[in-house]
Amino acid sequence: MKIAITGKGGVGKTTLAGTLARLMARDGMDVLAIDADPDMNLASALGIENPPQPLTEYKELIDERAGGPDGMFKLNPKVDDVVERFGVVGPDGVRMLVMGTVERGGSGCMCPASSFLRALLRHVVFKESSVVIMDMEAGIEHLGRGTTRGIDLMVVVVEPGARSLETAERIKRLGTELGIGTFAAVVNKVREEDIGVVESRLDELGIPVLGVLPYDISLVKADLEGRAPVEVGGLVVEAIKGIKGKLR
């Protein structure tokens, strides 16, 4: 199963991705969590104190595999050993990779780095693990680059508000153009009286709702203590357990 978790910035993508990865690993699944968000916060949601170095910092490796910055670059560089060499294993046996960011403007041609990251995502999506969970960057930039081709399920995290729902609509449209066939939504930060309105709008977009995450002071506690949400528990973790059950 290959799951990409996306949505507008600040809607709770990383909390969902990290908690879902830990819970699925506790069920005995082989889980690879990929931090594909430039903010790189997934490690804290997984409870990993020392995350791996971002792959884009291995510039010599990228040059070797994808071609030098001043010459031709390879569209399909070798990446089949990257998870074992550059990933880390965290609590509950979750493996983790950090993609890093592709620099722009004055840093020279970064085409090899882009090629390397795209090839890696293709490889892990198709071959590397029984469950791949990708915490994507906010918005729809990744869809324009085609990095989510081959995903089994795209989960859009939404919150009440026009901009969040507009982002969900664009994600659905662009994802469909890329061949992603299955979408679902998780609604976060919503008052009980507003749930019906949000669900109705998502229904119009053809995006079924997997679950609703309630306000939970336990997330604040986890953040203050520097612990993963799954280690603290609470209403949100219980809600994500319900979401996990629908993914089988």
Image (spheres, grey):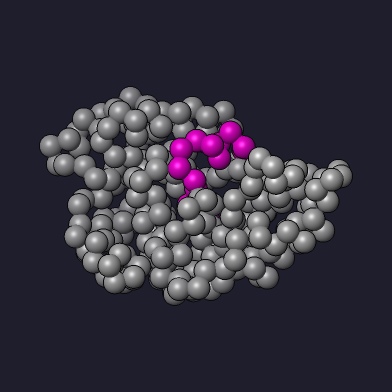
Q: Using the image as rendered, state which of residue 222 and residue 210 is in the foreground.
A: 222
- The image shows residue 177 at horizontal and vertical percentages of 57, 28
Find the residue positioned furthest to the top.
204
| Left or right of 28 in this view: 78 | right
Give the answer, above or below, for where 41 lies relative to 230. Answer: above
The reply to whether residue 184 is visible in this rendering is no
Q: Residue at x 75, y 48 (%)?
A: 112
- The image shows residue 140 at horizontal and vertical percentages of 50, 35
- Please identify the quarter of the rendering in which residue 20 is found: bottom left
Give the answer, above or below, for where 58 lies relative to 169. Answer: below
**Chain part drawn in magenta:** 131-146
Q: Residue at x 34, y 30 (%)?
A: 163
Q: Using the image as rendered, state which of residue 159 and residue 49 is in the foreground.
A: 49
Residue 26 painted magenta: no
The reply to whether residue 117 is visible in this rendering is yes
| Left or right of 98 in this view: 13 | left
Find the residue positioned furthest to the front.
106
Q: Residue at x 52, y 45 (%)?
A: 152
Count of picture labels: 0
Q: Quadrant of the C terminus?
A: bottom left
Find the residue positioned furthest to the left.
193
Residue 133 painted magenta: yes
Q: Residue at x 76, y 61 (%)?
A: 61
- Please identify the quarter of the rendering in which residue 87 is found: bottom right
- The image shows residue 228 at horizontal and vertical percentages of 35, 68
- The image shows residue 4 at horizontal and vertical percentages of 49, 47
